[in-house]
Image: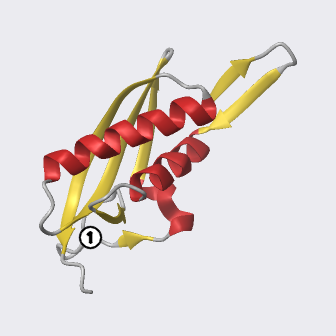
């Protein structure tokens, strides 16, 4: 699926993968995020951290008519307040998508796939 925007100069098509990549990039900039996790079921109880080129695998973009919904699967750092980290991710992703693509986001759902201890 993709989003069609009509402008004065023509049509713009934005794919869900582009939206997912921008959302994933915005999320990992937030404090307390170790990385993005795959949306697929955890194998052997271990969440795999996705690399930059695979952010779209940790984000699901859904569309209902004009509404855009985003599900994000993340791994947080040990010792951070998970509710604050999730709220920060929601705010940052919504801001980036609205400013970058001009989209109105209806909801951003955060799924914590794991907690990691970061070694200095």
- 28 relative to 120 in the view: left or right: right
To which quarter of the image does residue 62 belong?
Answer: top left
Image height check: is 66 above or below 35?
above
74 on left or right of 79: right
* Relative side of 20 to 34, left or right: right
Of residue 55 and residue 97, the one placed in the foreground of this image is 97
Q: Relative to 116, is 94 on the left or the right?
A: right
| Residue plotted at (66% across, 35% down) | 14
Residue appearing at x 39%, y 37% in the figure: 70
Give x and y (percent) for residue 64. 44, 20
The front one of 52 and 45 is 52
Q: Can residue 64 be spotted in the picture?
A: yes
Q: Residue furthest right?
A: 9
Q: Determine which residue is flagged by label 1.
A: 47
Give the percent coordinates (x, y) of residue 15.
Answer: 63, 39
The image's colouring method is secondary structure
User: Which quadrant holds the N terminus?
Assistant: top right
Which element carries disc 1, helix, strand or loop? Answer: loop
Residue 69 is situated, as x and y percent measured from the top left of the image, at 40, 30
Seen at 41% across and 59% down, the residue is: 28
Decide which of 43, 10 is in the foreground and name it. 10
Instruction: Judge whether 88 appears above or below 36 on screen.
Output: above
- Quarter holding the C terminus? bottom left
């Amino acid at each position: 699926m993709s989003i069609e925007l009509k402008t004065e100069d023509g049509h713009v098509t934005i794919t869900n993968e582009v939206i997912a990549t921008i959302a994933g990039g915005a999320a990992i900039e937030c404090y307390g995020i170790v990385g993005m996790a795959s949306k697929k079921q955890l194998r052997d109880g271990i969440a795999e951290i996705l690399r930059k080129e695979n952010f779209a695998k940790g984000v699901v973009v859904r569309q209902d008519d004009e509404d855009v919904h985003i599900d994000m699967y993340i791994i947080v750092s040990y010792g951070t307040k998970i509710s604050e980290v999730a709220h920060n991710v929601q705010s940052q992703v919504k801001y980036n998508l609205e400013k970058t693509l001009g989209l109105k986001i209806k909801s951003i759902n955060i799924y914590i796939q794991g907690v990691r201890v970061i070694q200095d």
